[in-house]
Image (cartoon, rainbow, N blue to C red):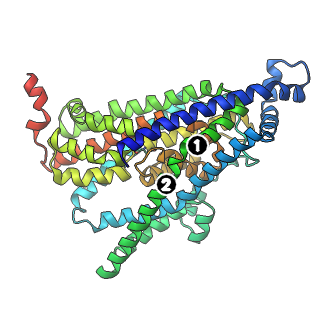
Amino acid sequence: MTVLGNIKIHWLVLAGILLGVIIGAVLNNLYVDEIRQQVLGDSYTNADLQANAKALNDALANHIKGTTLGSTLHGIGGVFLNLLKMVVVPLVFFSIISGVCSMGGSASIGRIGLKTLGWYLLTSMLAIMTGLIVVNAISPGVGADIMIPTQGREAHTPSGFWDVVVNMVPTNVVEAAASFDMFGIITFALFFGVFLLQLDEEKRNLMVGLFDAASEVMMRMTMFVISLAPVGIIGLVGFTVATSGPRIFIELFDFVLTVGLALSVHFLITLPLLCFLLTKRNPFTFMQAMSPALLTGFSTASSSGTLGVTIETANEEAGINNRISSFVLPLGATVNMDGTALFECVTVLFIAQVHASNHPDFAPLTLSAQLMVVFLALAVSIGAAGIPHAGLVMMVIILNAVGLPIEYTALIWAVDRILDMARTMTNIWSDCCGTLVIAHTENAIDDSVLFAQENSGA
Ligand code: ASP
């Protein structure tokens, strides 16, 4: 995926959002008064509007769906959502198997591999915890006046902790795939990958090649679906704004702020602190050295697309030995996504709070459900591809697991580009810090390169 291609998509996505907002606002403006009169009569107060928010929203959604423009928006958004759901199951299945194979097959697995995985798990969990704390402290979405038409699929109360654990082991993997049970699929794929590695060499190579190819096919298919985002977004954002009114952006402001704050804590405090404690080097000098990779990540919103720049910068500007960077960084670009993990956690809890605010029958997520969100956020961040919007594509997995309607992703699409840029930069920064820490333990950092600028400035 070229940088140029990403920039182009970036502008198209923005144009899609803008167009969606304009069309949605016009439709909303055209019909909202008429529907209020139909439902509430000629005179009504603000309190009436609030008390009947759901009935009004449903009536408006039905009315707008009855118009040509409204049904077109709804149709386009629906096709896009279905395409997103269509790719997720095979994408996760094949990419996990091919990921397990690529780790197990490499000679570098062992000491460095274990350290790498240890770092990735530790920082992803810290990122999720940061997200969890910040989202619970700020509580974006509580009392939010956002109604999303959910096509009659209201959320159900999520299952308990042990139900989740038992369901992690699928009795029938085909059924798990059909019912979108991602935990079951992940477990089966992990088992499959591990046992595939035990085949004799000829069969193993054949199977690894097959699964690598299948995973690449799914990656390309996903990229194609994401390239349709500008059009899909017109439908999703347009219909959302048409039924909820342009004020949803005000309601989303808290949410964007929450994600931004949590990402900043992880980016500027947690990761630098870990780097300092484990390597005794100035993390901000390292951050400055890695800035070409971080900024490329920010502008492309793709860890995979930035990988070449990240490796090159780590070697040339930070003095990290290629033996370490060429192993740790590619692995990180696919499996280590702190920013994505944090984003998943904050977003699902935000959506749960929005939903609970408008559906008194929906109990806010219990501790065990929040725990499930944590584990799924981790799993999803490992399974998500390093391409733009992958985190949002995978979000349907968690929404499905905790029983929230996936239509809420329509809301997030409206602001996902900017969040994606920030979380991608965080993903890459965590990979870079991991490389520094592991290179330190392997004595593979040339400090004369890393501190060259400081020294020349002194
Ligand atoms: N765009 C992110 C990345 O490439 C993945 C995501 O959408 O969260 O790292």
Mark 2 = which residue? Answer: 222
Pointer 2 or 1: first along the chain = 2
Residue for point 69% across, 47% down: 75
**Residue 295 seen in the current view:** yes
In the image, 52: left or right of 316?
Answer: right
Q: Position of residue 350 (x, y in %)?
A: 58, 36
Q: Amino acid at mark 2?
A: Thr
Mark 2 vs mark 1, foreground winner is 1
Residue 125 appears in which quarter of the rendering?
top left
Where ligand 1 lies, by quadrant? top left
Residue 43 appears in which quarter of the rendering?
top right
Residue for point 22% across, 66% down: 107
* SS under mark 1: helix
Residue for point 37% across, 52% down: 334
Image position of 69 with respect to 373: above or below: above
Mark 1 = which residue? Answer: 231
Q: Position of residue 331 (x, y in %)?
A: 31, 54
- Tell me the quarter of the image containing the C terminus: top left
Q: From the Cβ of disc 1, is ligand 1 less than 8 Å away?
A: no
- Specify few, some or many for label 2: CA neighbours under 10 Å numbering under 14, 14-19, or 20 or more: many
Q: Which mark is residue 450?
A: none
Judging depth in this view, the residue of 239 and 382 nearest the camera is: 239
Residue 314 appears in which quarter of the rendering?
top left
In the image, 142: left or right of 377?
Answer: right
**Residue 142 seen in the current view:** no
Q: Position of residue 95 (x, y in %)?
A: 43, 61
- Specify few, some or many for label 1: CA neighbours under 10 Å numbering under 14, 14-19, or 20 or more: many
* CA–CA distance in space, label 2 to label 1: 15 Å
Image position of 93 with respect to 43: above or below: below
Q: Amino acid at mark 1?
A: Val
In the image, 83: left or right of 293?
Answer: right
In the image, 356: left or right of 426?
Answer: right
